[in-house]
Image: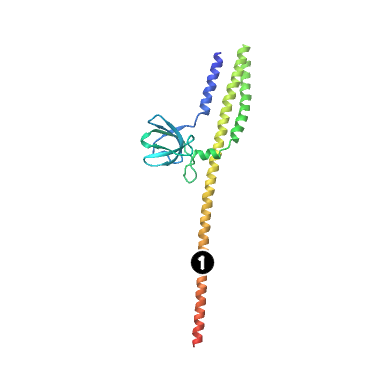
Amino acid sequence: MRDRQLILCLIIGVLFITTGCAKRALLSYDQAPPLAFVKIGTVSGQTFNGTIEEKNSESLFLRTKKNNRSLTRISRDEIIWISGREFVYDGAGKIIPESEIQEQKKNNNFLIYTIGGAGLSFGASFFIGSLIHRGMDDEKNGRTAMWSTTALGTTVGTLLFAKSGKNRDRNIAIEAIRDQRFNQVKNQFENQKKKRSDIKNALEQEKADHAKKQAELERLKEELEKKKK
């Protein structure tokens, strides 16, 4: 019974560590940028999770999951603390909102890593558990140790692989967003460049037409002067 309780506590501890939220840092009011996903504690004891949509020197406006259609105004004087995970930026130094990352993110690697990791972890931990079983004289304790090792190893391995897959999906989504924004800026630059080129060509054509008309006027003027003579 004691062994089972120990294994259960270990599994719960591993679950807490490997599936816990990413590290969050305390931020000052000025350090919390617009579009950042933050957690805010207030003097009333309430906490708010959401994305900062607008911000000024007196208050900020948060879009939360519970009230996604409207903004929650929080006065600067009411805020006790603000925490947020590491912010992600694009190539131009603009923040990428967490909501945009989640919309872009797929779960392909998460599923592959979880399923594959479960199989690999089970095989490895069962092998180790079998070695432990063979090294013990008591058959009952040996089998308990073997299956406890297998259960713990499979759980730990699966969670670690799943976390790795989840992180990979997130990183892929971030890079995709950065590429999209880069291409948007590139397209805008190309469009502006084309517009400037079109305007330049139009001005040159107008200048050429004007010179042509001026030359024609000079020719007609000369003909009229010759006729007068």
Residue 203 at what x, y percent from top left?
Answer: 50, 65
Residue for point 60% across, 15% down: 144
* Element under disc 1: helix
Q: Nearer the viewer, residue 49 or 217?
A: 49
Question: What is the number of callouts on the image?
Answer: 1
- Residue at the far top: name it: 138
The picture quadrant where one finds residue 126 is top right
- 77 on left or right of 171: left
Residue 191 at what x, y percent from top left?
Answer: 53, 55
For disc 1, the marked residue is 204
Image position of 17 with respect to 91: above or below = above
Q: Nearer the viewer, residue 127 or 111?
A: 111
Residue for point 52% across, 58% down: 195
Residue 153 at what x, y percent from top left?
Answer: 58, 23
Q: Nearer the viewer, residue 177 or 160?
A: 177
- Residue at the far bottom: name it: 229
- 62 on left or right of 153: left
Quadrant where the N terminus is found in the figure: top right
Residue for point 50% across, 72% down: 211
Residue 30 visible somewhere in the drawing: no
What's under tag 1, amino acid-wise? Answer: Glu
